[in-house]
Image: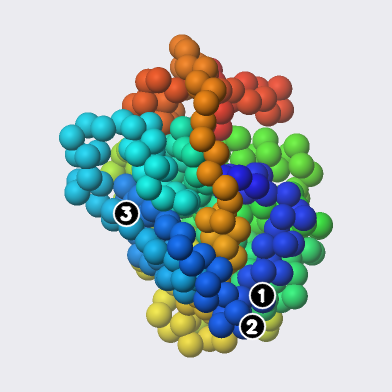
Amino acid sequence: MRHLIDFGDMTRAEWDTLYQRCEAIMDAPGDYLDACRGKVCANLFYEPSTRTNFSFQTAMLRLGGQVFGFADPQSSSVAKGETLKDTIKMVSGYADVIVMRTPWEGAAKAASLYSNVPVVNAGDGGHMHPTQTIADLVTMTRLRGGVDGLTIGVCGDLKNGRTVHSLIKAMEKFQNVRFYLISPRELGVPGYMKDFMRQRGIQHLEVTGLESVLPQLDVLYMTRIQRERFVDPLEYKRCKGIYVLTRGKLARAKEELLVMHPLPRVDEIDVDVDDDPRAVYFRQARFGMFGRMALLADLANQPRQERTEPVAIGCHPICRNPRCITQTELYLPPLTKEAEGKTCCGFCDKELT
Ligand code: NCD
């Protein structure tokens, strides 16, 4: 793996190696104090973040490396109109690995075309967030011994929730995982995710009610309604507060259920759930830091690859997704991919119509 843009970039063998390294770090962090000594990580956060930014920073510091970057693009030349390409070409001259979060879907993919060092997607709009999935899989594996055979309920904004999309993508690497996709109809998973599940034979059922499926779940993965991604504020108003997990509802759930959440929480998990031993979301955030240590120990130590071949830019396919990176960065190559007989944008995965 050279970049981590989408969970599909990682093979099952690479995941197993990463998890083994993660366990080794958790069990003996002192053995890894110099794993990134002399290495520098660039954290480019074009969107707000607490956990992802801080956990990448602390991960690098705990490995003996250094971090620079911005948490507010207005403090960089982005505010002067610099393109993503130019920013990445500069930053990849300074850093050994680039971690980036953007509101534009496919931006990390675009950056990887121009970077001399590995690029990690720390969230691209409502599209993907593969390192949150690392946190999620470490949590399930460490606390339940593995992922195979789990019945997972994902609940909330499945349309805009990038953590959900990456989690679903990861499940092609495991056996017999079943999903309950719990959302209001208008916030169901995007078509390209449904195509993916159909193609890979991942069992899933879309439902609107949480309580009826709760007793069957091994993992309940709650998510917030992603207010910042709604085009219509009225639609957000209609959907907010629709699912709230309470202690009372948990009474019907399995004893060994894991209640997970990528966080931040808004109102979808009552605070009285926090003290239930099944609520593992704060532990999940800490597991995320160790997972990111395992990732950085690999990627930050990869040799630079100076690019000599020009990227074949041309007229890019017209992607109608208003949040796709191809809408704003007009020099990108015309990348497409095929899924279930449909031609999709190679950056944001949306079907090209
Ligand atoms: C998530 C994100 O940014 O997508 N947070 C995170 O990285 N832990 C979830 C969210 O914002 O709802």
Neighbour tally class for label 2: few under 14, some 14-19, many 20 plus, Cα within 10 Å: few
Q: Do the residues labelled 1 and 2 touch (CB within 8 Å)?
A: yes
Which circle's residue, 3 or 1, is located before the other in the chain? Answer: 1
**Observer able to see residue 314:** yes
Which residue is rendered at x = 61% and y = 45% of the image? 2
Label ID, residue 27:
2
Q: x, y percentage for residue 298?
A: 60, 58
Residue pointed to by mark 1: 23
33 or 287, which lies in front?
A: 33
Q: Distance between the residues labelled 3 and 1?
A: 28 Å
Does residue 309 sit above or below 210 in this rendering?
above
Amino acid type, callout 3: Gly
Mark 3 or 2, nearer chain start: 2
Residue 214 drawn at (x, y percent): 63, 69
Q: Count of labels shown?
A: 3
Label 1, label 2: how far apart the Cα atoms are: 6 Å
Q: Name the residue under label 3.
A: 69
